[in-house]
Image: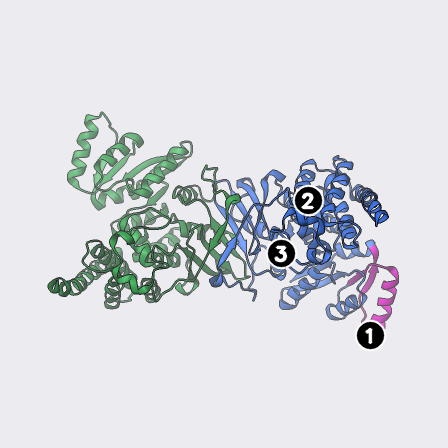
Chain colours: A green, B blue
Amino acid sequence: MKRIAILGSTGSIGRNTLSVVESYPERFQVVALAAGKNLDGAFEQARRWKPRVLSVAAEADADTLRKRLKQAGISGLEVAHGTAGTVKVATHPDADFVVSAIVGVGGLEATYAAVKAGKTVGIANKECLVAAGELISAEARKQGKPLLPIDSEHNAVHQCLRGGKMNEVERVWLTASGGPFLNTPRSEFASITVEQALNHPTWRMGKRITIDSATLMNKGFEVIEACHLFHVPPAKVEVLVHPQSTIHSMVEFVDGSILAQFSVTDMRLPILYALTYPERIQSDMRFDVGNLRHLDFCPPDMDKFPCLRLAYEAAEAGGAKTVALNAADEVAVAAFLEGAIRFDEIPGIIEHAVVASNSDTLQSIVEVLEADAEARRYARKRIKKTAEPRAASV
Amino acid sequence: MKRIAILGSTGSIGRNTLSVVESYPERFQVVALAAGKNLDGAFEQARRWKPRVLSVAAEADADTLRKRLKQAGISGLEVAHGTAGTVKVATHPDADFVVSAIVGVGGLEATYAAVKAGKTVGIANKECLVAAGELISAEARKQGKPLLPIDSEHNAVHQCLRGGKMNEVERVWLTASGGPFLNTPRSEFASITVEQALNHPTWRMGKRITIDSATLMNKGFEVIEACHLFHVPPAKVEVLVHPQSTIHSMVEFVDGSILAQFSVTDMRLPILYALTYPERIQSDMRFDVGNLRHLDFCPPDMDKFPCLRLAYEAAEAGGAKTVALNAADEVAVAAFLEGAIRFDEIPGIIEHAVVASNSDTLQSIVEVLEADAEARRYARKRIKKTAEPRAASV
């Protein structure tokens, strides 16, 4: 019986994880959950899963939740809140496996705490590795515990890597759908609307990650994640556009063999893989291989999608550069979604924040969070500068 | 230093193996070679590789070779001949690894002897496993030594299988180029010429295997080989047509993940893999992943290519059925190449021989060879019956 804690239990990955747990009650047990602001969702999960601890974001919500649970006659579970609550969930002594799925840097401290507490961690939170990859992966190595990727691409890489040893890896190939603007001429990028950018061809996801997929920044983040997860330099991580997103990623070995992984596009599959690794167990998520017809590929266009180039540059430089990349991207994407900047202005905002940040190695999560806040301030200032003259001229 | 014996050293696989050995002189050493009728080739290999034993097919050739070597001042190597000579090479006490690459059932006894002598065997000879797969794989298991596939498809499967345990395998997917008649209407099969059939789209190979690729019998043999190599029933081995032959094969796991292997189409790659397994070493055989563009797939048409269906049926029945399948196919293909029968008459000849054979488990290589001879007689008789009325009517 594997005992599981979930950071971000009411989000998409959290709910998919619970769906996997539900399918295999003899294998998995939920011991701790960290929800966010979704109070109804948290209440339902408390009722259904009876975790030992359940954490929510705000103190007031925690109070409300305690009352509702009491009224419903549900007892024996501790309600916590805030970062302390999330850390409590992440380090719960009964948990063997922690799913890190809080979106944004909000999950950073708890994820690091889980790794430090010697838990096996399934990583679905991009920001953890983009912003604090060096700290987290160093700590995981120290603890001798694996970081198991839940992202479909990195999960695919993890599977392909079983075909050889780490020193036999020539390159990691991350596939990219190419986003909705793969075939849009660059000259039209200035007029891309929010609606167009939110229309991702293969995956249904949150708004920020959908925009990040449209700019290819998401793929850039994945390059950085791959470096930390698999201890390879950015030069050994390549991106290949594959519009069908059938092949999730590939590994090229030194002898010239390449292994590729594919499956249905269902997040429950990489979650199941991470939860059961090194075993594989029967699932009903079958890809109809016999009906495979066409797979297309092409190289990414870094001129058209400068965010990918920025990510490689930040990854090479290291230190606070990748923190700034992530922080400025989040701010720039929010500004685009609010209509403050154009789609093709996103890369420029990020580039300025990255250039302004330094590349000294960050020594602690506190330093990461400071660099994050600074990059956000910088990006906001830049957005103002970009947007104001336009607003004035309207 | 791995010490290597090669059965079939002057053939295509043999020469490719020596090319690999040549590239890594610090890793591999040739200790014994079994050539066939190519006396000049055998002489050159003796001079270049100085094996401890070199075997040729005929006694007279062995005598000639001894004289030529003496004249050339080459000493210290034993020249042997016939099956006894091949077995001597296969079981040479100094050999760690035996490459089994003699085409046809002629390599059967020596390959079995190598396995029995506890050698690690790299299998490139199809007939060994099609005709005597049960005996050979049972013996390899008894010896606790792996059978390492050198065929590109099975080598790919072997690589993909590293992604899980054998009891986690849902299906093995062998890819097939589809041969030159993939898109030829069945109505034109009667008029297919030898020249058309010898024109394989992707691989340059011997005549028989090229015709076997055109009838899909080659893929049928590979299904049978896969069953023995990986201990899976025929129902768990599927064929998928993939005209580019980029992906060499795939493994589907119980959790729904599929791993696929691809590489350049160069036989030295699976040879290198087998010779170095479980390690992988650097090679210059690079597939340009960044230039990957389109991969196409479709299911095989068993009505158009009845040989594939026959192979599945023989594999399910077992015993002498697969021996007869292989033997009758060899005879039928030879008859087609000689112009005695039409392309579309090949499957019928084979089917009759398979139906006539029995499915009792074969207990020894002698029984395999007896069943092989009987099926050949049966097929020849059938060919006569098919061809004679036509010759008479001309």
* Residue A279 locus on image (x, y percent): 48, 42
> In the image, is residue B76 part of the stretch drawn in magenta?
yes
| Front in this rendered view, residue A71 or A92 | A71
Q: Residues within 10 Å of mark 3 (few under 14, many from 20)?
A: many
Considering only order in the chain, which callout, 2 or 3, is on the residue closer to the N terminus?
3
Residue B274: give its label.
3
Q: Which chain is mark 1 on?
A: B
- Structural distance between the alpha carbons of marks 3 and 2: 29 Å
Residue range (magenta): B53-82
Residue B73: give its label.
1
Q: Amino acid at mark 3?
A: Ala
Q: Which chain is mark 3 on?
A: B
Classify residue A230 by image quadrant.
bottom left
Q: Residues within 10 Å of mark 1 (few under 14, many from 20)?
A: few
Q: Are marks 1 and 3 on the same chain?
A: yes
Secondary structure under tag 3 reads helix
Considering only order in the chain, which callout, 1 or 2, is on the residue closer to the N terminus?
1
Residue sitting farthest toward the left: A392
Q: Kindly indicate whether the residue at mark 3 contacts the one at mark 1 (C-beta within 8 angstroms).
A: no
- Structural distance between the alpha carbons of marks 1 and 3: 35 Å
Residue B352: give its label.
none
- Structural distance between the alpha carbons of marks 2 and 1: 51 Å
Classify residue A272 by image quadrant.
top left
